[in-house]
């Protein structure tokens, strides 16, 4: 019977043509809405006016979509035919399902979907991802005992997952950010409430009521940040020329300053020593006769001193990673930088992997391959616990101008990074917020880098404001030479542990605690975003409740960026219980 049906798509490219519902909200990097399809009513959501952006479909070996009780909701063919505006997440729970599903997706030209398995069946996800290597993986980790958040990404990546569904209790802001730093997308169920789930800074919300989730997101004002913006120091933190690029000093400076990570470049000397270096040769960086880096021994390079930094020389990768153990929350992004494509790449990766496996080394690294595909596949095989990235070479000088163009690039990117938990690391002039909106539905990490204008001040004056545009585009992370302009911004906002009691008509001024990137905190006056109930703003920073009742609100802080743009951060939601007589207080 299935053979007589017309294929769902005429080509794999056509399967990427999905008109996702994008709420009209001001949330920068709004969480994706994921809805489980468990019965006829949830199936109807796929064709509603506001369908879920992603749909969780449990698939059995007979290729039926089944509910939580195991009763079929409909055939996979029929359900996927309804997913014209929704990305399907195909959950498998049996090895028998994998070959049948792989054949079905191939016959129907489906390349745009996500594979899912329970954490208890994580080996099954790896098997499914190998059978369908174009598809990205997700693990449902609810109800499971998991490793620490910092160690979890590499663990999940080794089983083919680039995203996971976690219990609401597990999704603290710090745990969510630790996983996002390492390219893992976090989905939180709305069992704690949709506002509370969104305020944790997650990438997705699992909910059976997508319309309510969209309405919540539409309440936020323009340029609202619900999650912390990950900031990576390009070639280490040079801090306006105080440190030399690609040195242990600059990478440790990034850890001290509060960066979320630091990017470095690794080359191999002729005698097989991985060193931290970007340039082809020593010209302009070292005070010596010109030497080709990869044609020199480490013994020849070690005595060299950097121009303007007589205390700095050529640092070995095996010295850098132990030095970063002091900063376990600052992952190191490694860009393999051979002079010629694939030149000694296998040896470079093997040496790097051996260094990372040492107990003296900081373990939290992310591999970047540049444009050296398919070399990424070799890195994945040698270092299976490393999240990986694909850095696009500069050929597309403009960002996608519409949905179709964005889909074309995503289609190509899906095949270029097939089988890997990969991020996309192009220059910021090649991507935009539209592209990110379509990438995040697919669990793709987007972390552009901005070109340094420090060597051309006139170009910095002309192009510097675009850095704020990059910050406000909502990407998962940002690799930049100009991080010092953003380090002073608060990382998160919290409501005080004890808030003042309230009575109807009584004025109060909301105050919160801003946590800075370097771990310090400061008390600050804030505004409010009212989610439910009624509060009155008096225009002088004070608020009051006109009547008794319950109000759900979030503290809101408006912050100014370097070039005058503003954005907003929020606390987690809290309830105000207002009484017309004696105050009952505020319960967080």
Image (cartoon, grey):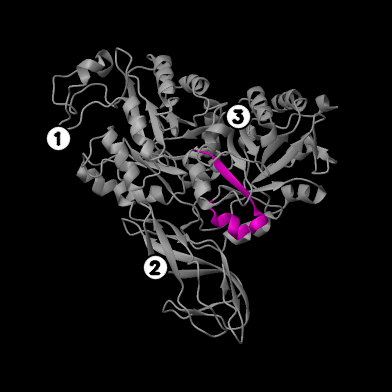
What is the spatial separation of the Cα atoms under label 3 and label 2, in whole angstroms? 44 Å
Residue 164 or residue 377, whichever sits in front: 164
Q: Quadrant of residue 320?
A: top left
Tell me what residue is drawn at x 33 percent, y 59 percent: 564
Image quadrant containing the C terminus: bottom right
Q: Which mark is residue 457?
A: none
Magenta highlight range: 183-201
Tell me what residue is drawn at x 34 percent, y 51 percent: 486
- Local packing at callout 1 (Cα closer than 10 Å; few below 14, some 14-19, many 20+) is some
State if disc 1 and disc 3 touch (CB < 8 Å): no
Q: Is residue 193 magenta?
A: yes
Q: According to the image, label 1 marks what residue?
A: 308
Is any atom of residue 531 visible in this view? yes
Say what secondary structure mark 1 lies in: loop
- Local packing at callout 3 (Cα closer than 10 Å; few below 14, some 14-19, many 20+) is many
How far across and how far down the image is residue 235, in percent?
31, 35
How far across and how far down the image is residue 352, in percent?
40, 22
Relative to 405, is 523 above or below? below
Q: According to the image, label 2 marks what residue?
A: 524
Q: Which mark is residue 159?
A: 3
Relative side of 517 to 423, left or right: left
């Amino acid at each position: 019977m299935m053979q007589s049906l017309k294929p769902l798509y005429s080509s794999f490219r056509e399967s990427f043509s999905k008109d996702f519902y994008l709420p009209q909200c001001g949330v920068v990097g709004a969480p994706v809405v994921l809805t489980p399809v468990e019965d006829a009513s949830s199936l109807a959501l796929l064709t509603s006016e506001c369908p879920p952006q992603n749909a969780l479909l449990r698939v059995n070996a007979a290729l039926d979509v089944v509910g939580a009780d195991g009763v079929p909701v409909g055939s996979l063919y029929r359900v996927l035919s309804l997913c014209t505006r929704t990305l399907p997440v195909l959950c498998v729970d049996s090895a028998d399902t994998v070959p049948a599903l792989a054949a079905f997706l191939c016959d129907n030209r489906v390349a745009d979907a996500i594979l899912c398995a329970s954490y208890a069946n994580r080996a099954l996800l790896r098997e499914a991802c190998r059978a369908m290597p174009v598809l990205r993986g997700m693990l449902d980790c609810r109800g499971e005992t998991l490793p620490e958040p910092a160690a979890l990404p590499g663990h999940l990546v080794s089983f083919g997952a680039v995203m996971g569904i976690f219990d609401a209790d597990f999704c603290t802001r710090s745990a969510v950010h630790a996983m996002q730093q390492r390219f893992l997308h976090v989905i939180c169920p709305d069992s704690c409430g949709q506002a509370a789930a969104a305020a944790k800074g997650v990438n997705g919300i699992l909910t059976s009521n997508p319309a309510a989730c969209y309405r919540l997101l539409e309440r936020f004002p323009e340029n609202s940040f619900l999650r912390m913006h990950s900031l990576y120091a390009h070639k280490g933190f040079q801090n306006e020329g105080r440190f030399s690029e690609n040195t242990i000093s600059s990478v440790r400076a990034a850890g001290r300053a509060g960066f979320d990570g630091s990017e470095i470049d690794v080359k191999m000397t002729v005698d097989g020593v991985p060193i931290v270096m970007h340039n082809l040769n020593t010209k302009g960086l070292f005070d010596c006769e010109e030497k080709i880096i990869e044609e020199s021994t480490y013994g020849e390079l070690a005595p060299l001193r950097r121009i303007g930094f007589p205390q700095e020389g050529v640092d070995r990768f095996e010295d850098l990673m132990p030095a970063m153990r002091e900063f376990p929350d600052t992952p190191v992004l490694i860009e393999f930088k051979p002079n010629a494509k694939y030149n000694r790449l296998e040896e470079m990766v093997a040496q790097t992997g051996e260094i990372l496996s040492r107990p003296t080394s900081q373990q939290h690294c992310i591999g970047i391959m540049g444009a050296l595909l398919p070399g990424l596949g070799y890195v994945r095989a040698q270092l299976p616990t490393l999240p990986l990235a694909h850095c696009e070479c500069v050929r597309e000088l403009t960002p996608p101008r519409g949905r179709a163009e964005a889909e074309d690039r995503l289609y190509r990117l899906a095949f270029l990074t097939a089988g890997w938990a990969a991020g996309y690391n192009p220059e910021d002039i090649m991507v935009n917020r539209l592209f990110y909106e379509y990438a995040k539905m697919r669990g793709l990490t987007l972390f552009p880098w901005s070109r340094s204008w420090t060597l051309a001040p006139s170009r910095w004056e002309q192009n510097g404001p675009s850095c704020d545009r990059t910050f406000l585009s909502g990407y998962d992370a940002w690799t930049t030479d100009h991080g010092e302009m953003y380090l002073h911004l608060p990382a998160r906002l919290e409501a005080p542990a004890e808030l003042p009691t309230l009575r109807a008509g009584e004025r109060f001024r909301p105050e919160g605690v801003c946590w800075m990137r370097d771990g310090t905190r400061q008390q600050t006056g804030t505004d409010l975003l009212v989610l439910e109930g009624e509060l009155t703003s008096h225009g002088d920073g004070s608020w009051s409740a006109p009547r008794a009742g319950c109000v759900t609100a979030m503290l809101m802080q408006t912050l100014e960026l370097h070039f005058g743009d503003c954005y907003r951060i929020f606390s987690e939601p809290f309830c105000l219980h207002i009484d017309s007589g004696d105050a009952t207080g505020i319960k967080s």
